[in-house]
Amino acid sequence: MPPSPPGFFVRLALALRCLTDSTLAARLLDPTTVPAADSAPAPAPALQTTTPDSALQLLGLLQQEGRLIDFLQEDIKGYSDGEIGSAVRVVHEGCNKVLERYLSLEPISEQTEGASITLESGFDASAWRLSGNVVGQAPFTGSLAHRGWRASHIELPRVSRGHDVRILAPAEVEL
């Protein structure tokens, strides 16, 4: 009895691994290829640590103007679609205000979604995510599923020394 084909997630993990392991990709394309005994795998890219301060500050601004955290933490199962829609309108308006005030956003691709697009060899893998049947090496031709976003400028408000950015929304006491 032949072995059963691998499941979707196994195939997806294998495809993602092929993006970073050219030796594996070559072996899959030509199973007769045997890697050289002295070839060492490429070193993994160095990861840098970042502080969460700016992310927490932005999240706090989205809460302050759009009540984003309140909305996401609310159990909405008991609300009608109309009630949810009304709440989303307020959240959308407030959060959009924050984005317009503190960020300049631009699409990564100027093409419209659904357009055919070709990514040449050397494309910026941090700006483009390949999905679907990813096999071989660039150039890759496919359909643009999402234009992507890039922050071209960000200027968050300054915070005073000792300000705890982990406080996203202070508890409120009405007197």
Image (cartoon, rainbow, N blue to C red):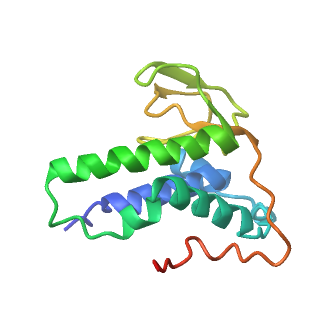
In the rendered image, the vertical position of residue 150 relative to residue 115, given as above or below: below
Given the current orientation, which residue lies at the most extreme right position? 161
Number of disc labels: 0
Residue 123 falls in image quadrant: top right
Horizontal and vertical percent position of residue 90: 38, 47
Compare residues 83 and 13 and report the one nearer the observer.
Answer: 83
Relative to 132, is 5 on the left or the right?
A: left
Q: Position of residue 35 (x, y in %)?
A: 69, 58
Q: Is residue 65 above or below residue 114?
A: below
The percent position of residue 95, horizontal first and vertical second, equals 51, 48
x and y percentages locating residue 139 in the rendered image? 61, 27
* Residue at image coords 48%, 58%: 14
Q: Quadrant of the N terminus?
A: bottom left
Vertical position of residue 91 compared to residue 147: above or below: below
Instruction: Decide if residue 165 is on the left or right side of residue 49.
Output: left
- What residue sits 32% from the left and 58% below the top? 8
Is 165 situated above or below 28? below
Residue 117, can we see it?
A: yes
